[in-house]
Amino acid sequence: MKIYNAEFILGSTKPEHFPKTTMPEIAFSGRSNVGKSSLINSIVHRKNLAKISGTPGKTKQINFFFVENMWVFADLPGFGYASVSKSERELWLKLNMDYLNNRENLKLICSLVDGRHEPMEKDLAYFEWLENNNKKFIIVMTKCDKLSKKMIETRKSEFEFFVQNCTNCVEVLPYSSITDLGRNSLFAIIDKFIKKS
Ligand code: GTP
Ligand code: MG
């Protein structure tokens, strides 16, 4: 599966500046440094479409991309970076809530977690919020190139246990932006949700 066209549209912290489009949209969210931008690049097979940050927590705005002139990908700012002040955390929360609650064409939220770490409270609270607010989501376990096959299965089961009763969680998917593990599966899931009305 190949993507021929992907381009950056704009980045914004203000809902009134979000692109006004009726195209189906997929969002990518998760803690700072978890690999959101890298995953977007790996899906579209472009090295630098979304900027990879050496400094965690650098992306403070929502970055929007057109893909194949038919879909929109939204790269949401990361949460949970320790050095961020309380006021910045509040701004982050407001921006995310404004986006998640009001984006009409949002079809699926790819919620990224770092496969190297056990499920964290903040991630679990986020899944709970998505479930309770009826948002379809998939848990994508990133950086699985750093894990053994056995560890990948163990971690996957840990996350599956937490979402066993969630009707809005599509699946838990091991992923690596380096080896493209999970890329075709994620692409197929995104494609399916984009086509859902
Ligand atoms: P923020 O925008 O700051 O929230 O970060 P982000 O979630 O967009 O993460 P980003 O894609 O910038 O990646 C953070 C770091 O993790 C970079 O050094 C990446 O090279 C690395 N990284 C991302 N994905 C993978 C992966 O699948 N495997 C490995 N080994 N490293 C990865
Ligand atoms: Mg990023």
Image (spheres, helix red, strand yellow):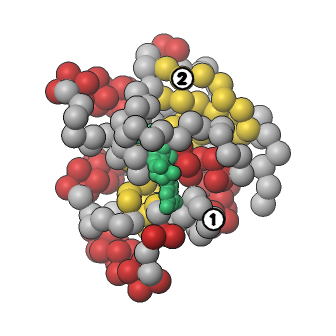
| Residue extending furthest toward the front | 54
Closest to the camera, between mark 1 and mark 2, is: 1
Q: Position of residue 186 (x, y in %)?
A: 60, 61
Question: The C terminus lies in which quarter of the figure?
Answer: top right
* Picture disc at residue 18: none
Crowdedness near tag 2: few (<14), some (14–19) or many (≥20) residues, C-alpha within 10 Å: some
- Three-letter code for the amino acid on which mark 1 is drawn: Asp
Left or right: 98 as drawn, with respect to 83: right
Residue 126 versus residue 187 in the image, above or below = above
Residue 193 versus residue 185 in the image, above or below = above
Left or right: 77 as drawn, with respect to 92: right
Cα distance, mark 1 to mark 2? 26 Å
State the residue position of label 2. 11
Left or right: 39 as drawn, with respect to 93: right
- Three-letter code for the amino acid on which mark 2 is drawn: Gly
* x 35%, y 46%: residue: 31
| Residue extending furthest toward the top | 16
Image quadrant assignment for residue 99: top left
Q: Please name whichever residue, 33 or 99, is drawn nearer the observer in this view of the structure.
A: 33
- Labels 1 and 2: the sequence-earlier one: 2
Q: Please name whichever residue, 65 or 150, is drawn nearer the observer in this view of the structure.
A: 150
State the residue position of label 1. 180
Q: Position of residue 157 (x, y in %)?
A: 35, 78
Q: Position of residue 18 (x, y in %)?
A: 53, 20
Q: Position of residue 118 (x, y in %)?
A: 27, 67
* x 71%, y 51%: residue: 45
